[in-house]
Structure formats: C-alpha cells, structure tokens
Image (cartoon, coloured by chain):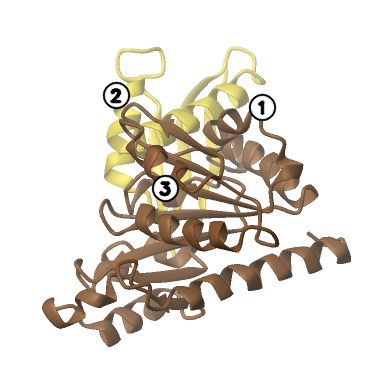
Chain colours: A yellow, B brown
Amino acid sequence: MHELGIANSVLDAVLAETRRHLGALPVKVAVRVGEFAGVNPEALAFGFEILTSKTEWERLRLEVERTSGDELELAYLELEEP
Amino acid sequence: MNRVNLEQKVLSENDRIAAELRQRFVKNDILCLNLISSPGAGKTSLLERTLEGFAAESRGGPHVAVLTGDIQTDNDAARLARFGFPVRQITTGGTCHLDARMITHALEGWRLEDFDLLFIENVGNLVCPACYDLGEAAKIVVLSTAEGEDKPLKYPSIFFKSALLVLNKIDLLPHVPFDLPAARANARRVHPEMEIVEVSCATSEGLNAWRQWIEQQRKELSARMIAGIA
C-alpha cells in the first residue's frame, strides 16, 4: 500500500537527476529492493506505471533488482540525450 | 544512451528528516521507541500498562511522552492520556504508516529537553511501517498469541528490523493453538539476535522484563551520549 509513495520517491530522484542533463529524457531507472525491505516489487511497478502513464515519461521503465538484505536503493538511471 | 549511477536511498528525503530527529533525540538524551504490530496485537494496551507503571513511580520515574498513530479517531490518545503524560494523536487519514515528517510536525511545541522517553505507536500494520525510519533508537514489534506463530516468516521485514519482539497475550496460551517455541524460533530464523520478552497486559506477567529492557536501552543511550559516539 505504501509502494505508490515509494514509486513517487523514485520519480523525485529521477526528476532531480534528469534536470542536470539538459534536454535529456529518462528511459530506465534501476532500483535495488532487498527481501527484507518491506516493498513488493509488483506493487511498486504498478504504482510506477500509474504515475508515469500518459505523461512525457511514459517510456520510462523501472527495473527492480532483488537483493538479500533490507536495502531500498536507486542503482542507476539511463538517459537519452539530444 | 547515458547511464548515470545514482547510488542513493529511495527514501532519502524521509531518511534525512529521520536523521535530524535522531540527532535531536540524542542531543536531549531521549530514548525513542517505535512500536509496530498488526491491528489488535496490543500496542496500546502495552503502553497503558507501561504508563501506569511509570505514573505509579511518580518522582524518579522517567518523563514520558507518546505519539500515537491511527488512520482515524483519537481513541488511543484518549486511552493513553489518562495516565497524566503528554500524548498526541497523529491521524493519518488513510496513510498506512507514519513517516518522519509526521513525527516532526507532531512534536512541534513540545520541549524535548523535558522528556526522557518517547514512545511512537505506529499505525497497526506489519508491512508499511517497516520501511520508514522515524529517528527512533529501536523498532519494537508486538505479536500476540491470538495471531499465528508464523507471522515472523510471513512479514520478515519488520522482524528483521526490530530490536525487540514483545510476545503479548501470553495469558491466552491455554486457550489458543499458538505454538510459543515455534514463534520464538521463527523470529530468530529471520533475525538471530532478536531479543524477546513475553508479556500479558491483562495479568501484568512479564512486564518487569519489558521495563528492564527499556531501562537497559536508556542506560546504553546515556553511555553513548557521554562517550560522544551517538
């Protein structure tokens, strides 16, 4: 149920980084979700889809890497630059 | 295509506010404990018995404050305010957990230097509260014998992140199929170092062990503060 808020936090970080690259379009963001993070990857993906569909970031893909600890971290962002 | 390494926490904004809170708690020598459980496991009852005990000590007991979170109603704050300690209700209006910003707002106007101990009673939920650091010294998970002994396996995140498991309602053990040794084993399978106290808020059994655990945490906090490593 909290995954929508977490998806929003991911997008905040994507926005902050994208602004540093003039004219760039974010196409993929990778997140590491530990098995003890308390985050359901499917619910996170669903929240992410709701927040990005029909926006200029519709093509932005979320990649979730499962890890063994309790981390909930942003790994990298791929940008298409003009 | 340009790949940029981000290497940051997803909840960095919450974590930043939580770090500020933790610094304020440590500076004021306040032990902050974040209580988490499913609805009905007995967080409020545990706090009632705890506050009752502290109130009976009158002078010499710790100065306690409580923040209690629920989706709706201020029923819990009314229950807890009877013991004479400052209590504030945080009504989340639908949000399934407390976050650090809510704690910062709820503390506004309180003089933190007046307190020794702050309890945060989270929204009844074993899932979402596990993700949000509130600046606490420790998370505590409460599990009751009216639930299944496999809860630690079903909700591993909160058992992994909690320093203490309070097994509540042990007075019901003769009447419920709860397997106590299995519950302990399941908790330690997820979190081998987890400390466990077994209590009944109805009969007061085991509450001394809970109080001793709190006192031990307060001593360790003060020792860390004196050593300047907190």
* In the rendered image, the vertical position of residue A42 relative to residue B169, given as above or below: above
Q: Residues within 10 Å of mark 1 (few under 14, many from 20)?
A: few
Could you tell me how far apart the alpha carbons at marks 3 and 2 are, in whole angstroms? 23 Å
Residue, far bottom: B181
Q: Residues within 10 Å of mark 3 (few under 14, many from 20)?
A: many
> What's under tag 3, amino acid-wise?
Pro
* In the rendered image, the vertical position of residue A73 relative to residue B161, given as above or below: above
Q: Nearer the viewer, residue B211 or A9?
A: B211
Q: Nearer the viewer, residue B82 or A2?
A: B82
> What's under tag 1, amino acid-wise?
Gly
Q: Is residue B105 visible?
A: yes
The residue that disc 1 covers is B109
Q: Chain of mark 3?
A: B
Could you tell me how far apart the alpha carbons at marks 3 and 1 are, in whole angstroms? 25 Å
Q: Position of residue A15 (x, y in %)?
A: 55, 22
Q: Position of residue A65 (x, y in %)?
A: 42, 52
Q: Nearer the viewer, mark 2 or mark 1?
A: 1
Q: Is residue A36 visible?
A: no
Q: Nearer the viewer, residue B208 or B36?
A: B208
Looking at marks 3 and 1 on the same chain, the residue that comes earlier in the sequence is marked by 1
The residue that disc 3 covers is B129
The residue that disc 2 covers is A50
Q: Residues within 10 Å of mark 2 (few under 14, many from 20)?
A: some
Label 1: state its secondary structure: loop
Task: Please tell me the numbered disc located at residue B40.
Answer: none
Q: Nearer the viewer, residue B107 or B36?
A: B107
